[in-house]
Image (cartoon, grey):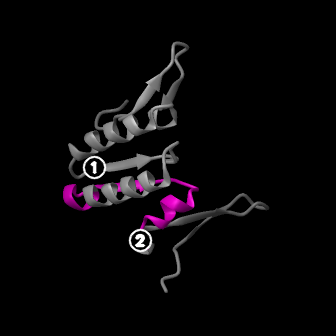
Amino acid sequence: MSRGVRSLLCDPQEDGTVYPELKTADDEHAILRLSKEITQLEGALILIDDVEMKVHPQLHQLFMLHLQQLALRNNLQIIVTSQSPVILDSVPLNGRIFFDRDDGSGEVAVRLPTLM
């Protein structure tokens, strides 16, 4: 990886394939390790792809709240991708951005949520 870039949680396999640790069986442990790593960062951009985990939905909510608190405290920008309504509901409206793909053209449009 280039200077200044690192992967926080990976699960390398014997064949050289690397899977994100959040996709392995011990997701609770992965959440704790990821939280510990992020706590030590300041002023960083953190990308978490498909944050869905095989844990109780309440843990999803707590994890997202924890990420928001860390972002504010440590001046972090955290971008999370998810299709989970539980995770989406854990993020304030002003913290959401949607990407919609047009099936016909393949173009991607950026959409902000409507504030009520």
Mark 1 highlights which residue?
A: 44
Classed neighbour count for the residue bearing mark 1: other residues with Cα under 10 Å, few (<14), some (14–19), many (≥20):
some
Residue range of the region highlighted in magenta in the rendering: 71-92
Q: Secondary structure at mark 1?
A: loop
**Residue at x-position 27% and y-position 60%:** 69
**Residue at x-position 23% and y-position 46%:** 39
* Residue 97 drawn above or below residue 19: below
Whole-percent x, y for residue 14 in the image: 51, 13
Give me the disc on residue 92: 2
**Residue 82 highlighted magenta (yes or no):** yes
Which tag is nearer the camera, tag 1 or tag 2? 2
Q: Are marks 1 and 2 in contact (CB under 8 Å)?
A: no
Snapshot quadrant of residue 68: bottom left
Q: Give the CA separation, mark 1 to mark 2.
A: 21 Å
- Which one is nearer the viewer's eye here, 45 or 40? 40
Whole-percent x, y for residue 116 in the image: 49, 86
Snapshot quadrant of residue 9: top left
**Residue 81 highlighted magenta (yes or no):** yes
Relative to 16, 6 lies left or right: left
Relative to 77, 113 lies left or right: right
Whole-percent x, y for residue 32 in the image: 32, 40
**Residue at x-position 27% and y-position 39%:** 37
Q: Secondary structure at mark 2?
A: loop
Residue type at the position of mark 1: Ala
